[in-house]
Amino acid sequence: MFRHILSVGGLTLASRVLGFLRDVLTAALLGAGPVADAFFVAFRLPNHFRALFAEGAFNSAFVPLFSAKLVQDGAAAARRFADEVMTLLAIVQVVLLLAVLAFMPQFMTVFAPGFADEPEKFRLAVLFTSITFPYLLLISLVSLYGGVLNSMSRFGAAAAAPILMNLCLIAALVLATPLMPSAGHALSWGVLASGVAQYVYLAWDARRAGMALRPVRPRLSADVKRFLAVLGPAALGSGLTQISLFADTLIASALPTGAVSYLYYADRLNQLPLGVIGIAVGTVLLPEMSRRIKGGDEAGAVDSQNRAIELSLVLTLPAAVAFLVAGTPILSVLFQRGAFGPSDAAASALTLQAYALGLPAFVVIRSLVNGFYARHDTATPVRVALAAVGINVALKLALMGPLAQVGLAVATSVGAWVNAGLLAWLLHRRGLFRADARLTRNLPRMALAAAAMAAALWLAGERLSPWLGAAGIVERLGGLVVLAAVGLGVYAAAAALLGLVRRSDLARLRRRRAKA
């Protein structure tokens, strides 16, 4: 499991590095003005629906059932089940796509009502979303193929697919922007092209694995009915989560120009550890637990969950500390150039710090929720999500006035901690999860290592302030590299001294990688 997590995390890291390059170019060409706000809404809306129809509810219902089918009935039966689900998914997506395209202005009035007061921004948002929304159909099929391949322990292609997205968007910025009215137009077409590229790549890899899927005559077989029964609560739970994300877009559209962009740039940095660590762990843990539970190894499933939570926290805490202590230099060095000025960097940094407060919770949620999904329980996370989203949205409305977009990020972090706490409590109460001696022993050690890193970053930041505040990008980038090296060095040393990382664990990982 650790080997697969490292593989998925490594590919995701490569994608995120390319994503940073993409965002640096985007910030320089778009800045945080009306064109940027319009594009970011057009980019976020299909991804909100993607999380609902594909990665969220869909995978939480599909992967455990497909994994069980693969173990019990073999590859041929599992492929027939995937064919039936793919047909159903494609039909739903095509109907949704046609409906949204037919009523795009009305759709935009609902999801970005604040844009209605600025006709040009509203027009651009409608145009850009009309171009990007077909991406949802393509990326939903990509997620289906990813679920199939992950269930077969083939994690590479699905983890590498986002690399193609970033390459397409970088190419659009560099090559297509001079040929179009704005970089927003070029990026919108780049989003659509990336969906095509990812679909072709995943379909090719599935064919190599003997899982070439094809549409079949739609029918409600016993397997599909069971899938829909599990999907229903999962879709409701994902829908509740997406309400919170929609609320960000909706409320931010009513804030002054730039708020949507500040949220975007801060969230992009926040998504780095969430993607590299949280998604990697969750992607590998769900089929791992599903197989163990199906084989009667409940103790092994709980042990896998403990180790996943431990690894998630050990790797995430340095990022959370860095964002909290050094958010301003990170944002200014990475994005402050061209149309993205010092005030934009400062506003985005405050938003990033607010997101960082909830980062450990977001990562742990990925491991906790799989304790329910692996047992085909998609209803309990719905009740948890309902409580978390209610608190989240209420806080957004209360804090949007005094704190603007920073208040939205604070509310998101609070909601994440409520979600994680309730999930852990319910699993423990049902006897499905208990923090073992190793995890319990290491939690305070993680906190001490993180505190040591925070102190080192603060002291080093004071010393490096002339470099970090210099006019030249070379000096600022050099200062940030030194700051990062100091922080990570102190955290690694503290982790070793406190026993968080043991030589025996590293040696075991090396042996497993050598055998693979």
Image: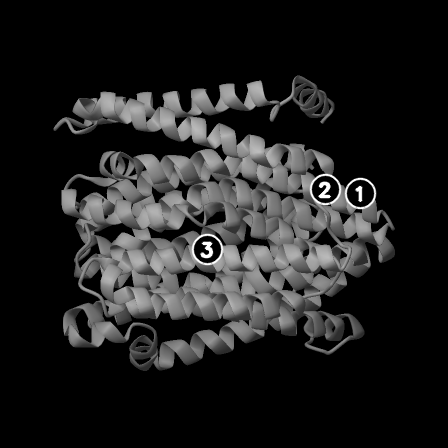
Q: Earlier in the sequence, mark 1 or mark 3?
A: 3
Task: Determine whether the residue tagged by mark 3 lies in a helix, strand or loop.
Answer: helix
Colouring scheme applied when the structure was drawn: one colour
Residue 503 seen by the camera: yes
Residue 58: quarter of image: bottom right
Circles 1 and 2: CB distance less than 8 Å? Answer: yes
List the residue tagged with mark 1: 300
The x and y percentages for residue 54 are: 55, 62
List the residue tagged with mark 3: 196
Q: Earlier in the sequence, mark 2 or mark 3?
A: 3
Mark 3 is on which residue type? Val
Residue displayed at 75% across by 41% down = 303
Question: The N terminus appears in which quarter of the rendering?
Answer: top right
The answer to whether 392 appears left or right of 348 in the picture is right
Mark 2 is on which residue type? Ser
Mark 1 is on which residue type? Gly
